[in-house]
Image (spheres, helix red, strand yellow):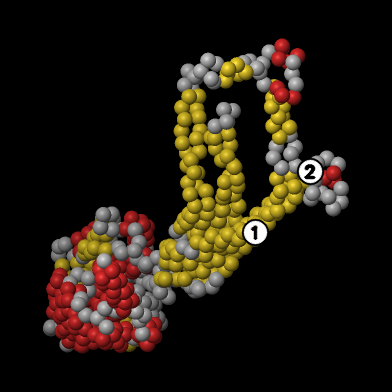
Amino acid sequence: MKKIAGKLAMACSLAVLAACASGPQPTPPEVRALLDAGKLEEGVARLEQVLAATPGHIEARVLLANTRIALTNQLLAQAAQDVARGAWDAAQEGYRRAAALGAVDQAMLGMRKLAAAQSQAQALAGVEQLLAAGKREEAREALQALLARHPKNGRAAKMLQTLQDHAAAAPAGTVLGKAFQKRLSLRFHDAPLRAVLESMSRTSGISFTLDKDVPADLRVTLNLQDTTIEQALRNLLMSVQMEQRIVDERTVLLYPNDAAKQRDYQKLTIRSFRIANAEARTVANSLRTLLKTRDLVVDEKLNMLVLRDTPDTIRMAARLVALHDVAEPEVMLEVEILEVQRSDLESLGVKWPGNVSLTPLGASTVLFDGSIASNPFTLNDLKNLNSKGLLASVDPMRLSATVNRDNVSVLANPRIRIKSREKALIRVGERVPSVSANVTSTGVTSQSVNYLDVGLKLEAEPVVYMDDEVSIKLNLEVSSILGTIFDSNDQPYGYRIGARNASTVLRLRDGENQVLAGLISDNDKRSSSAIPGLGQLPMLDRLFGSKGSERTKTEIVLSITPRVLRNQAPGAGGEVEFDAGTDASLRGGAVHAGQPPHAAPQEPAPPVPVPLPASAPLLERNGG
C-alpha cells in the first residue's frame, strides 16, 4: 500500500508540474507594441515566430487569429479604394495578400470587381477618343452599350447626359452648326423679307423655305453688326413674329408663330427624368406651374417623370429638375446625457419605546388530549382581572448610528443620423403600466392597461444651412416615478410621475459642442423622534431621542455636438438665374454675350441689293 501511495503522489506531482508548464503564458510586449502601432503585418509575422517556438501558446494563437481577421479586412478595404481611384496594380496586390491570409472567396470577388472596373475604364477611354475625334454619335452609342452592361457606372451616365444635353441645347449644332456660326453684318431699312433671307442664304449656304401663309409683302428693318447667322435669324424672326424648324442639313422652314402653325410644324420630344432625391410629384407641380406643360406623366413607383413637349421646354425642364433633385443635407448628432444623483442619509440617536399595548387573556381549559383551548373573555374574567391575565406588548428600543452617502451617475451616449428638417426621437427608460377602470350604465366594470414612458425623452429637429451651421430645436424631458396611487380597496392603479422639461433652439457650427445644465431636483427631508421633555434637553437629545436627515440632489447635464455629414454643394439648389424666354416662347429672349438682345431699328439706310445664289434658292411651302 505504501508503494502504491508513493506512486500516486509522484503521478500527482508530475501532473501539477505539467499543468504549470502548460499554463497561460503572456504575449511578448513587443508584439503588443506592434499591434497598438497599427503594424499588423509585422505583428502577424512575430506571432507566427512565437507559435513556432511555443506551439502551445494559447494567447498568442487567439491573438494571431484576431489579427489576421483585422489585417484581412484592412487589405480588402484598401483594395476597394484602389479600385475606385483606378490604381489597378495596388488593388491586385491587395487582393493577392488577402487571399494569402485565407480570405480566398472575398479576394476572388474583389478580383472580379477589379476586372469589371478595368473593362469599364477602357471603354470610357475609347469614348473619350471618339469625342476628341468629333464622333459624338458613335460615342453616344458606346456609352449606351456600356450602361446596358453596367448601369451603376456614374461616370458613363454623366457623360451620356452631357451629350444628350448638348444635342438638345444646340439644335443647329448637329445639323447646321458650322453654317449657323458664320458671321455677317446686315443693314436693311424697310426691306422685303425675301431680300434679307437671300443675303443670309448667300453667306451661309442655307436654303430658307417659307410657309404659304407668310405675307409676300412683309418688310423688315435690321441693323446688325458682326453677328452669327443663328443670332441674326433669331432676331429677324422675333421682329416679324415667326418661328423656324430645321428640315435637313441645308434647309430651314420659316412659318408664322401662331397656335395652328405651332401644331403643324413644332417638333415635340419625349424625355424621361429619374428623380433620385426629390419627390416626383413635387417636381411635376413645379414644371406645370413654370412651364405650363401639358403632357406630363408622374410614375410614383419609380419616382420618374415622363415629359412630352418642345425641345426648348425639355431643356428648361432639365434645368428645373436639376434644381430640385439635390440630396438633402444630413447631420450626425452626438449626444451625451448624464444624470448625477447625490444622496446623503444620516440617522443618529436612541429610539425609545413609544407604545405599550395590554391585551386581556381569557381563561384556558386543558382538553382530554392534553391540548389547551382559550375561552372567550367574559365580564366575570374582567372582575377577576390581574397582572397574570394581561398580555403586554412593548415597542423595541433601537440605537441608530448610520451615515450613508451615495453618488449615482447614469450616462447615455446615443449617436443619431438625421436629415435636415426631420425630427428624431431618443428614449431611454422604461414603460410602466397604468390601470384604468370604466363602469358602464349597466354596472359592468372593465379595466384597461395603458403604458407610460418613464425616463429620458429627447426630441431633436436639425436644420442644416449652406455655411455648415446647424440649427437644432431641442425638447428634453426627464421623468421618474415618485409613488404609487391606491384606490379605496388599497389596490394600486396608477403612479405619481415627476417630470423636468427643457426646450430650446440652438445654432451651432459643424463640430461645435454645447452643454446644457441646470435641471436640478433638490429634496431635503428631516425627521425627529424623542421622549417628551427629555428629548428637548441640550446634550441629551441624542440620548433620549433620534434625529435623521435625508437629502437627495439630482442634476441633468446634456452635451450635444452636430457633425455635418452631407451638405448641398455651392450653387446646388441655391440661387440660380437663367434665361426663360418670353411668355409666348421659351427661347424668344435668348441672349448671347457680346451681342444685342434684339434687332433695334437704326437710322434710315439704303437696302443692300443681294442677288439670289443658284445654290441656295428661296422656296415657298404651299401646305403644312
Under mark 2, the amino acid is Ala
Q: Residue at image x 27%, y 59%?
A: 304
Q: Residue at image x 15%, y 67%?
A: 621
Instruction: Say whether residue 511 is left or right of residue 53.
Output: right
Nearer to us: label 2 or label 1: 2
- Quarter of the rendering occupied by the C terminus: bottom left
Quickly name the residue at label 2.
Answer: 530
Q: Quadrant of residue 585?
A: bottom left
Q: Position of residue 557 (x, y in %)?
A: 59, 62
Q: Residues within 10 Å of mark 1 (few under 14, many from 20)?
A: few
Q: Secondary structure at mark 1?
A: strand
Q: Secondary structure at mark 2?
A: strand
Under mark 1, the amino acid is Arg
Residue 559 in sight in this render: yes
Quickly name the residue at label 1.
Answer: 405
Q: Nearer the viewer, residue 378 or 17?
A: 17
Report how far apart the C-alphas of labels 2 and 1 lie in the structure: 25 Å
Residue 131 in sight in this render: no
Q: Position of residue 182 (x, y in %)?
A: 25, 86
Q: Nearer the viewer, residue 584 or 348?
A: 348
Instruction: Say whether residue 565 is left or right of residue 623.
Output: right
Q: Nearer the viewer, residue 238 or 414?
A: 414
